[in-house]
Amino acid sequence: MTDAEHAALLEGVTAGDRRSLARLISLVENADPGVERLLAELYPRTGGAYRIGVTGPPGAGKSTLIDALVATLRPRGTKVGVVAVDPSSPFTGGALLGDRVRLTSRTPDPGLFFRSMATRGSLGGLATTASEVSDIYDAYGMDLVFLETVGVGQIELDVVAASDCTVVVLVPESGDEVQAMKAGLMEIGDLFVLNKSDREGSGRAAREITSVLGLREPSTGWRPPLVSAVARDGRGVTEILTAVDAFREQQTASGEGKTRRKRVLREKIREVAERILRRQLWSGEGETALEDAAEAALEDGKNPYVLATELASRLASRRDAESSQQRGGRS
Amino acid sequence: MTDAEHAALLEGVTAGDRRSLARLISLVENADPGVERLLAELYPRTGGAYRIGVTGPPGAGKSTLIDALVATLRPRGTKVGVVAVDPSSPFTGGALLGDRVRLTSRTPDPGLFFRSMATRGSLGGLATTASEVSDIYDAYGMDLVFLETVGVGQIELDVVAASDCTVVVLVPESGDEVQAMKAGLMEIGDLFVLNKSDREGSGRAAREITSVLGLREPSTGWRPPLVSAVARDGRGVTEILTAVDAFREQQTASGEGKTRRKRVLREKIREVAERILRRQLWSGEGETALEDAAEAALEDGKNPYVLATELASRLASRRDAESSQQRGGRS
């Protein structure tokens, strides 16, 4: 990318151009070598968007709920970006999420953007990419970003860990799972939604969830509420948004938001630094060295663990030699 | 760990001591700093075990099928190690797999070992760990290793990618999914099992799967067969083992096994080298530098992408300084 293209892309994103937005997201998804610079230049424009992670068991209706939230938020003038992450189906290339494209394609609304990701790049995790897409939405001018996950696996947890507020969506059928989930899902939620609450068993499920939530020590002064909803009909949506606002206020007042923000920043810095190093490691000479090592292990019966250890120190030296040269060049 | 403990552990594993086996697996799971050395020393003892990856949609009966295979293999004298990977439920700490412990606990059979893993360590992926546990089983003297996955997500694919033979387990209900899966699941299988084939719709499902498999160009001279089974009753188990043997023979004859083995070795070397580097990066000074960077981003509004880039080059230099010192010390 030329410097002019680079500048035009950044200018486009901050000016609210959808095509620039889509293009930059693609660059981040592909872990293009120039992305750190682009993201660094966009960063001063961020800070305006509140990030809401939405997780819960498959089938809980998370995407329907987000659609309902968006339908309420847009008429209010709230600009919304959605990143939907589905690490469980690399095969379908996001086909499970495919029908969601309607959200954006039908209405070319500049205040709404939707992107789904099903496969991670070779260089980084889906969670890092999702967090970077949130930064891009933020710089574009979105007020709210939804980080939507399909399941409740490890990658999904990493995704919601980068949010300011985590909403856990359950259904009446989840009641039995609640006990087992006590140590996990229940602990990460700042707000719980009992979706499909018009179904049988909803009362019992609500009581069980509330009882488990009651066991939590509200160390931060916030006891996560449970909101009943029927996302399909838009029921409970206003209550959810009110609860999010209440959480956000309390989070600011208590300083909990700052602690969380620091953790998010630390993980971002760690992940981006690792991606930069990984990109340097396995390109050019590093790629050849890896291929040679695999050949030596296969053909000469060399020990792969020994080869890996040797490779690690060789790559470290090579990188330093390169960065010394760069430092020399700059001085 | 002292050198004596180290030696005793290796001696124990290669002599077939179950407690040593369990202990070494735990060290690998925790990415203990000494594991590369232990694995390197065990490596010359490996090469005897054939590794079979078992994947497929949740509920296809993969674990029941493996139990049935084990029940047939053990009386034949075949020693079997099982690694079951469940990245989708970090919460339950492997509770979904918990009942499988019966396999090993009820029968203290030295020729059978079972280990399930639900959470990845902080330093490496589940797939790398599963592959290393396979190496340990191999050195312990197992003839067969099953790499079992719970779902069909990206992590699970990485797990089966480290196997010599991949078995995809489907059920009659998977029929509709087969079309969508054409580009993914169908392509990675060397052998397909239609489990629960006593259920309605089994004939139609078998025809659909066979038809999709027929589209595959058998570039390696192997057209993946479909075996019908009812794992619960042990039906189809012998046929599956026969098909695996046929694949194994063809794989050796065609040289395809070698290509695959090289890919597996390359990924192992890459992953282990990255883990070593990561461990060096984020310990001691690196950890402090990361914490300082997060603080600077939060309190002084410093740009996290710039901080990450700086950190990456600083860490590279630090590592090189250390390894120069080590080289100096050794010379």
Image (spheres, coloured by chain):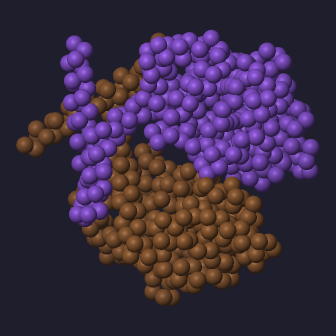
Chain colours: A purple, B brown
Residue drawn at (48%, 65%) of the image: B219
Q: Where is residue B87 in the image (x, y as percent from the top left)?
A: 57, 53
Residue drawn at (21%, 24%) of the image: A325
- Nearest the viewer among A99 and B78 is A99
Q: Quadrant of the C terminus of chain A?
A: top left
- Nearest the viewer among A166 and B3 is A166
- Nearest the viewer among B280 and B170 is B170
- Nearest the viewer among A272 and A294 is A294
Q: Position of residue A284 (x, y in %)?
A: 30, 38
Give the quadrant of residue A276. top left
Give the quadrant of residue B282. top left
Q: Quadrant of the N terminus of chain A?
A: top left
Q: Is residue B312 left or right of residue B125?
A: left
Residue drawn at (38%, 37%) of the image: A278
Q: Position of residue B65 (x, y in %)?
A: 62, 74
Give the quadrant of residue A280. top left
Rendered position, B299 above or below A180: above
Rendered position, A252 above or below A304: above
Residue drawn at (60%, 20%) of the image: A20
Q: In this view, does B191 lie to the left or right of A174?
A: left
Rendered position, A220 above or below B298: below
Residue B150 appears anywhere in the view: no
The count of marks equals 0
Q: Spot the residue most to the bottom.
A: B76
Q: In this view, does B54 lie to the left or right of B204?
A: left
Rendered position, B170 above or below A15: below
Q: Is residue B169 left or right of residue A318?
A: right
Q: Position of residue B109 (x, y in %)?
A: 47, 80
Q: Spot the residue most to the left.
A: B331
Residue A244 appears anywhere in the view: yes
